[in-house]
Image: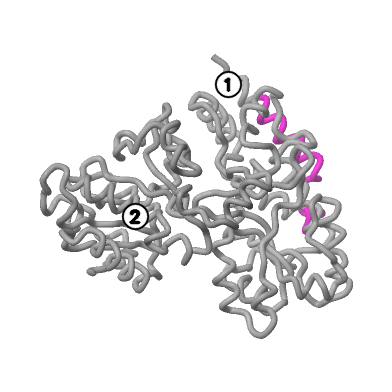
Amino acid sequence: MRKKLLSMLILLPLVLTGCGTEKKEAAGKIGGTITVVTDRTDADKLFEDIETKFKEKYPEVEDVVFESSNDYTNYITTRMNTKNYGDVLFVPFSMNATPEEYENYFEPLGNVKDLEEKYIDVTEADYNGVSYGLPAALNSLGIIYNENVLKKAGVEKMPTSLEEMIEACEKIKKNTDAIPFYTNYNNTLGVWGGALTSYGGEQYRSEMLKKGTAFKEGQPIREVMDLFYNLSSKGLTEKDPITGDYGKSMQLLADGEVAMFMMGSQEVPDIQKLAKGDNKEAIKIAPFPVKFNGQTSIPFGAPAVVGINKNSENKETAKAFLEFFISNESGYAKEFGGMSPDKNSLSADQKKMFEENNIILTVPKETPETDKLYSDIANEVGVGRLNDVLQNTINIGLYPNQNKSYNDYIKELENKWEKAVKNNEK
């Protein structure tokens, strides 16, 4: 296997090789060479294993070239200005804002209704009932915590409401030396957008548009804001989040110096590797501290979505690789701390989990029209990705004398939302 680590945007897309147009394969034939472009610069050995298994299944495949970037979105969107951006690639999540663009770059994989018979979560990259990408893996999103810290603090179980969360964090602060909740202010606040379906259901966007409000009590964005305001104003977060670092927070959680933070299940194995002694088994993940329709939800989403370059000259092999890559056969989902989206790949325990729990997807199930209207309004207000609004909320909680009040900030956002709604009326 050849692997190129491409982390510099100064590498011009036009001069890159191995981009799926080197060798045109006969229609219907699975063989030759394909290029796979990912955001994993840390998976050389895994990709070697995947290539070996794929070649065993399809002996006429000559080579699978993996190319990766640690600045993936910028790298791949620049490269997509040409036709040479691999045969198989991770669909940049930045395209969620313009789903009508999928067909310009990606091969249609099938109708959503048909694909739902075989796969879970086929609407990560869809438009007008057609899917252009499938999950590389499915991971649950939630609160990763160190159970040893909670036990030491006298917290019997993970909280399932805002009130319980604040109470648990106050016990941790009082009875231990650990930071109750690490915000990851600079790194992962945007990921909280994937939590909104847990707070408002898979149609929270259309419900929000019907109500004409986004910041009244009980609304998904407001509930997440309330969580951060309460945590920061009560001194339950790191003291200086602006200087925080996600890599540092992983080690602190592994060592029991941080009790919890928000992220996906794919992070659990990495944190367990950092932990020593009985902390290894103590690193776990729980649903968000909220109940929707009377019960907590296990939210699943895709850490990466895989698509096929519509300009590929080896689409049959690209399609075969995509299907192999996202199945249990490749081992990618398992290595990533998740599960395959292929329903036939589910273990007995996984099938039981889906049958016995309220499973919800992190991506809203909405019509393209609703998605566009919501995105237009949210982007105009400045809450399309939540980073800024949550940072502002934390700042207000930590430094009340240097900022407007939380209530005034809520009113300001509500006024902006109402104005944006009027600006986007037909």
Q: At which x and y percent is residue 181?
A: 74, 64
**Pointer 2 residue:** 324
**Pointer 1 residue:** 423
| Most frequent secondary structure within the magenta stretch | helix
Q: Earlier in the sequence, mark 2 or mark 1?
A: 2
Could you tell me the amino acid type at mark 2?
Phe
Which one is in front in this view, the residue at disc 2 or the one at disc 1? 2
Q: Classify residue 23 as left or right of residue 123.
A: left
Residue at point 84%, 57% (across, down): 166
Q: Is residue 358 above or below residue 417?
A: below
Q: At which x and y percent is residue 336?
A: 48, 63
| Residue 388 in sight | no
Q: Which residues are magenta?
A: 397-418
Q: Is residue 49 above or below residue 198?
A: below
| Residue 291 in sight | yes
Identify the secondary structure beneath mark 1. Answer: helix
Identify the secondary structure beneath mark 2. Answer: helix
Residue at point 41%, 33% (across, down): 114
